[in-house]
Structures are given as structure tokens and as C-alpha cells.
Amino acid sequence: MPADRTAPVKGSRLADQAWLLMLLPPLFWAGNAVLGRAVAGAVPPIGLAFWRWCLGMLIVLPFAWPHLRHDITPILARWKSVLLLGTLGIGIYNTFQYIALNTTTALNCVMLQSSMPVMIVLMSLVLFRDRIGAMQGVGIVVSLVGAMTLISHGDPATLLGLELNAGDVWMLAAVVIYAAYTTLLRRRPPIHGLSFIVVTFAIGAVELLPFYIWESLSGHPVQASGITLLAVGYTVLFPSIAAYLCFNRAVELLGPNTAGLAIHLVPVFGSLLAILFLGEQPHLYHGIGIALIAAGIVLATRRRV
């Protein structure tokens, strides 16, 4: 098997740009969280997740097919790992997030999501006994402080006032699930990136199908509307196809602990999107938080990039 089979785009220099690969997923995921909150109540959460992965799989399949034919043997050889990754990262994580966004605030959701890099480090330590270098540890702490600064609007008392509700529990479970997915990506078979996401997207869609049917029969069917088309279209193209290709490749290049720091950029981009599209005013804490997150990522990736 050629050495570059795992790259999202064979022979592409773009597939080796770790910085860009870390920047794009949190941008798209921030948009996903904003959109998920905006359509909560209008688009059922399981229906949104099902069509996101089903259509994403169908769109990617023609491009993945040439690689998939060569990769079927290693996929079958590690089918248990592929099934587990598809279940965790596709079938469960985003479904839990969409359910959470129906009953929790955006602030709580983003705060819990920002804890994911720390959760990934803990998962790596528990599952694989990974050692954390001094510089990487400092980078993780600095980045986390930056995320908390941004989320708390520069006032630590805000964090103390947060209360968990049912939505927060769903989101906390989603964070644990995605941390496990990220940590276990090292077990993925050595296949092309397109082959990997089309198979895992298919696994997620198939697993969600019975729950989607149940949700529809329970009086919450997906309605054909402009809001639905916008929500599904965005989630299929950006947080699904583009983000997963980039994030999976970043984990391959940098390892889960370092690549996971990209999650800290979700509140950064979330704040910028709010300023650009919702008319919110920028404040000093935005600059401080973003600067700390950037510094933390630089420290944590300095030895590897």
C-alpha cells in the first residue's frame, strides 16, 4: 500500500499544513453550535444528525470510491476499530450535542466543549499511558486559561454561577465521547481519509436510522423548509465533510493531545461569529482570551510542527 494512502488528498501539500488543519474544524464546529442552537425546536435533533451523515456519506462516496476499493481489506481487518470510531465520533457525539442544544445555554455548551482538550489528554493517559511533555503541559494550561477567559467574559465569577441542567449533562457526555473518539483515532486502519470518513459516516447514519424513525413517529418529523435545508446543508458540507477530514488528518500528524487543542478555538470563532453576524461588540477579554489560546497552541505544537 502506498505510504500516502492516509492523506485526505493524495500528494497534496495542503494535507500536511498542520496549522490550517487545526484552524478549520473549530471554525466550522463553532458555526455548527450557533446553527444548532438557532434551529433548536424547528429541526429535530436526531433528524438533523441523521440527514447530516446520510447526505454527507452520499456526497463523499463518488470521490472516495477509487480509494475505498483498495482500502476494503484493511477496513475489514480492523472492522471493530472502525465500528467503534464511527459509533463514537459520528453516531453519538453530534446527536448528543444537538439534543443538548435544545435545553442548555450557548455559554454552558461552549464551556463544556472547551474542556475537551483536557479530557483528551486524560483519555490518552488512561488508555495508552501517554506521557505529557513539560512544554505541552504548559501549552494546554495556557490554552485552557484563554478559553475560560473568553467564556467568562473576563470575570471568573461567571464560571461559578453556571448551573448544570439536562442539556449540560448531554453535552458533558458528548465531550467525553468525542475525547474517546479523538484518542482512539490512532487505532484507525492505514487507509485514505476519504475512505475513512465515508465508512464512518455510513456507520453513524445506519445506527441513527431506527432512532430517527422513532423520533418521526413520535410527532417530531423533519419538515421540508428553508430552515431545514440551510441547517442540513451547512452541517453536511462544513462541520461534517471538511471538518472531519481536517481534524482526522491533524490527529494523524500531531497526535490527539496536540490536535485536540484546536477545540479551544471553538469559543474564539464563536465570539467572532457573534460579533460579525449578531452585532455583538468586541471587548478586551476577547483579545486576551484569543491571545492566550494562540500562545498555548504555539507552546504545545512547537516541538512537533
Image: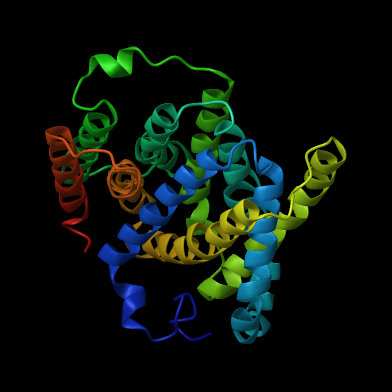
Residue at x 16%, y 33% (from the top left corner): 285
Classify 294 as above or below 172: below
Classify 165 as above or below 84: above
Counting labels gives: 0
Inspect this view and state whether residue 131 appears. Answer: no
| Outermost residue to the right | 217
Residue at x 22%, y 18% (from the top left corner): 156
Asked whether 183 or 88 is in front, the reply is 88
**Residue 145's image quarter?**
top left
For this view, does 224 lie left or right of residue 236? right
State the image coordinates of residue 138 (x, y, percent, origin top left). 17, 38
Classify 192 as above or below 111: below
Classify 140 as above or below 32: above
Q: In the rendered image, which quarter contains the C terminus?
A: bottom left
Asked whether 273 or 187 is in front, the reply is 273
State the image coordinates of residue 45 (x, y, percent, origin top left). 66, 41
State the image coordinates of residue 142 (x, y, percent, origin top left). 18, 37
Inspect this view and state whether residue 3 appears. Answer: yes
Residue at x 44%, y 84% (from the top left corner): 10
